[in-house]
Amino acid sequence: MTTVVLLAGSPGERSRSTTLLQRAGALLASYGVVTQTFGLTDFPSDDLIYARWDSPAIRRFTETLAAADGLVVATPVYKAAYSGALKAVLDLLPERALEQKAALALATGGSPGHLLAVDYALQPVLSALKARHIVGGVYATDRDFNPQDDGSYQVTEEIDSRLHHAVGRLIAHLPNPGSVQLHPEELSRQVAAARISI
C-alpha cells in the first residue's frame, strides 16, 4: 500500500493553499494512493511555540510520516516565505524525517512576484530533511482560483493540469510506484517525464 502524508500550512480550511492540497490529495486517491491529512489545527499552539517535539500530536505526525512513502505540503506565501506556523511544525521533525521519501511543495500567493518562494524557501527545508526526491512545485496566484458560493475555491483548468503533472511526477518518484493503480502507458509516461526532470 502506497501512502502519502498531506500537510496544510494554512490555518484556514477553505484557503487557496488548502484547496491546492485537497485537489492533489484527490488526484493521489484516484490512483489508489492512501493519503492522510494534517493541518495546523492538529498541533496545539503551545507545542509549536515551546518546541515540544515529544508531544502526542507531534509524535503522531512524526510516526505517520515515518510510515509513509511521500509528503505533499501546501502553504500560503507571506513576506516572500512560507508560513511561520508551518516552519514550526517542520522544525520539530527528526533530521532525516524524509529520507527515502518523495516530496511535493504547493504554494499560493497574491501575485506572480513570489513564484520563486517555493524554490528558495520551502524546498531547501525539504532537502534538509533528506527527501530522496523533491518534485518541482506548483505555485498559484489568486486569479488561479474560482470562488464558490459556499466560500470555498475551485482551481482553474490550467492549475489543475499542472497539479496532474506534479502528482504524476511525485508518483513516479515514490519508493514503490509500481503499486500505484496507474494504467501501464500512463505510468511509463510519468516515469519518463520524471527522469527528464532530474
Image (spheres, rainbow, N blue to C red):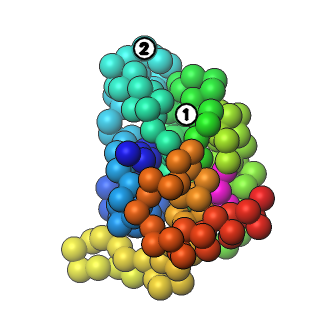
Residue 127 within the segment the image draws in magenta = no
Whether residue 44 is visible to the viewer of this picture, yes or no, is: yes
The residue labelled by disc 1 is 90
Residue 18 visible, this angle: no
Tell me which amino acid carries mark 2. Answer: Asp
The answer to whether marks 1 and 2 mark residues whose Cβ atoms lie closer than 8 Å is: no
Q: Residue at x 45, y 38 (%)?
A: 68
> In the drawing, what numbered circle is on residue 158?
none
- Quarter occupied by residue 23: bottom left
**Residue annotated with mark 2:** 54
User: Residue at coordinates 50% horizontally, 42% vertically from top-left?
Assistant: 69
Between 8 and 97, the one lying in front of the other is 97
Vertical order, 185 against 29 (above or below): below
Question: Looking at the picture, does residue 51 appear above or below residue 26?
Answer: above
Q: Is residue 95 left or right of residue 158?
A: right
Tag 2 secondary structure = loop
Question: From the image, which quarter does the C terminus lie in?
Answer: bottom right
Residue 90 picture location, percent across and down: 55, 33
* Range covered by the magenta-colored residues: 134-138
